[in-house]
Amino acid sequence: MKNLLLKIIPLFFIGITSTLSANNTKETHQQTIKVALLLDTSNSMDGLISQAKAQLWEIVNELSYAKYGIQKPDLKIALYEYGNDDLESSDGFIRKVLSFSSDLDEISEKLFSLTTNGGKEYCGQAISTSLKELDWGDNKNDLRLIFIAGNEPFTQGKINFKEAISDAKERDVIINTIFCGNYKQGISEKWQEGANIGGGEYMNIDQNKKIIHIITPYDEDIIILNKRLNKTYIYYGSDGANQFKKQATQDSNAESYSAPVSVGRTISKSKRLYKNPSWDLVDKSADKEINYSKIKRAFLPKELQKMSDTELQQYVEEQRKERILIKKKISELDRKRRVFVAKKQQESTKTNELESVIINVIKKQAIQKNYSW
């Protein structure tokens, strides 16, 4: 009997340990906000695409403040275009531009690659395609959202929008519709009905509205800090140099719109959602310990290629500390900037713009799933 107990007791405790471990794993599963943007890129949508390019970083910045209990959720964005004659008619003039991605530079790159051309706009098929092609996952605490924007009747195409949206419900995906035009016209063309069936919100925007960017006294200092921040990146690996160039290109794309857009991107780069461990040694060192003897020197910046393992490790650590200081300064300036912008916005209005409607809806729907700000 004694020997039998000696065998059973350890197994009992192993079972308890395994159960606790499984429960802990389940409790700490990272929540993710998944947003699929389905954008009409037909001829009349230049204003919509322009707003998306100009306001991406403010949307990302606002979502970076989201919380789920004590955790901070990840963000993944997917991008589709539809209604463009340059797209394949056999695919319903619909193209997946980007699968769900947390690479903010890639998201920006794909967004800036969009151009408009005339075409047929099949909203039901666009929704159906995105539901089938994207990996929506099965974590019940994830927030899964589709935002479809356009200006033609919601009823066009061979796939009935009601059937497509019923598939969305099965995947716990909320459908939000954005009509680019008059509010009542959007209702008559079934955009509101699509949102109602999909458990989401119907909105309208003026896609041709001139976006007024609020300039603050802190913008210039933030842009200067961005240049210092860029110097802390240490590319590595066969594709590292290309990714480093992509980062610079997306900086330039933001600058091409206005200083406030560039500021918004810089603030995004200072936050937790902007991370590049696949090509930057500083971000990689924050993820896990690096074996510097395995870092191929030929793929490093030229001035670092002759460094010993110890020298390279020390240099990475110096840049890590420098980056922390720069991000802290950007964060301090951003707090002051947000107060300044909030006061100015009381004097004006940002309604009927893509940024404001998307942020407001995401917050509303996130709170329903126990997210907070």
Image (spheres, rainbow, N blue to C red):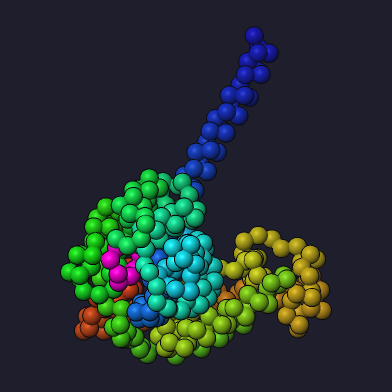
Residue 210 occupies quadrant? bottom left
The residue furthest left is 184
Q: Residue at x 33, y 54 (%)?
A: 160
User: Considering depth in this image, is 202 or 262 the residue closer to the camera?
Assistant: 202
Q: In terms of secondary structure, what is the magenta stretch mainly?
A: strand
The picture places residue 249, in percent across and down from the top left corner, at 56, 82
User: Considering depth in this image, is 64 or 104 the residue closer to the camera?
Assistant: 104
Q: Residue at x 63, y 24 (%)?
A: 10
Would residue 153 be found to the left or right of residue 284 on screen?
left
Q: Quadrant of the N terminus?
A: top right
User: Quick check: 83 above or below 129?
Assistant: below
Would residue 182 be found to the left or right of residue 309 on screen?
left
Q: Which residues are magenta?
A: 144-154
The picture places residue 330, in percent across and down from the top left corner, at 47, 79
Residue 165 visible (yes or no):
no
Would residue 74 be found to the left or right of residue 196 on screen?
right
User: Quick check: 10 above or below 51?
Assistant: above
Indicate whether residue 319 is drawn in magenta.
Answer: no
Residue 305 occupies quadrant? bottom right
Q: Quadrant of the C terminus?
A: bottom left
Residue 346 visible (yes or no):
yes
Indicate whether residue 146 is drawn in magenta.
Answer: yes
Q: Residue at x 44, y 73 (%)?
A: 85
Q: Residue at x 69, y 72 (%)?
A: 239
Would residue 227 be found to the left or right of residue 182 on screen?
right
User: Quick check: 45 above or below 162?
Assistant: below
The picture places residue 154, in percent across and down from the top left corner, at 29, 63
